[in-house]
Image (spheres, rainbow, N blue to C red):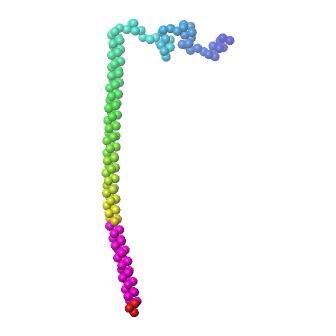
Amino acid sequence: MVQQSQVENPLTSNAMLESVLGRRSGYVRGLGYGAKPPSRRGMSTLEVEARVSSALDTVREQLEEERAKRAEMEKKLQEQYELERARRMEIEHKQLDLQAQVSALMAVFNQVNVYIVFFNVLFLVMHLYHWLGWLALFFSC
């Protein structure tokens, strides 16, 4: 019976070690009992300074890389801003040109309208004289 329950719920290697040995200070969180934290007593000052210096150099390199990336992104953003600004100015110039063309066309349309009205009045006057001529001829008989 004991063996059947153990087969159903097998223990992990870390759980087995903990049940047999109990908790120990050599345990590293996330790595289990096999990993041991580095001993601080055995390190010399030079080793510590070398590790700190190496870590600082790594951080400085990463910082420089990030700065370079940021500068490149700012440069691209500025280029996009300038392109967008140029496009807007081009659109504004085209709109002004179109407004000027529409104004010119409206002026021409108004002149043509005046001529059309003039010729319509002239046509009506000619018809009126024509009818008056017929009336005069009719009444003179």
Q: How far from the left and from the top, in percent, is residue 100?
A: 31, 57
User: What's the residue at 33%, 13% (across, down)?
Assistant: 49
Q: Name the residue at the right extreme.
A: 1
Specify the quadrant that holds the C terminus.
bottom left
User: What's the residue at 39%, 83% (across, down)?
Assistant: 131
Specify the quadrant that holds the N terminus.
top right
Which quadrant of the structure image shows residue 105? bottom left
Q: How far from the left and from the top, in percent, is residue 13?
A: 55, 13
Is 69 placed above or below 48 here?
A: below
Q: Main secondary structure of the magenta part?
A: helix
User: What's the residue at 33%, 40% (across, down)?
Assistant: 81
Which quadrant of the structure image shows residue 68? top left
Is 101 placed above or below 78 here?
A: below
Q: Name the residue at the bottom extreme.
A: 141
Which residues are drawn in magenta? 111-138
Q: Name the residue at the front extreme.
A: 139
Is 3 placed above or below 90 here?
A: above
* Left-right relation of 21 to 81: right
Q: Is residue 126 magenta?
A: yes
Q: How far from the left and from the top, in percent, is residue 26?
A: 48, 9
Is 61 placed above or below 91 here?
A: above
User: What's the residue at 54%, 8% (across, down)?
Assistant: 22
Q: How far from the left and from the top, in percent, is residue 91?
A: 34, 49
Q: Is residue 94 magenta?
A: no
Tally of numbered discs? 0
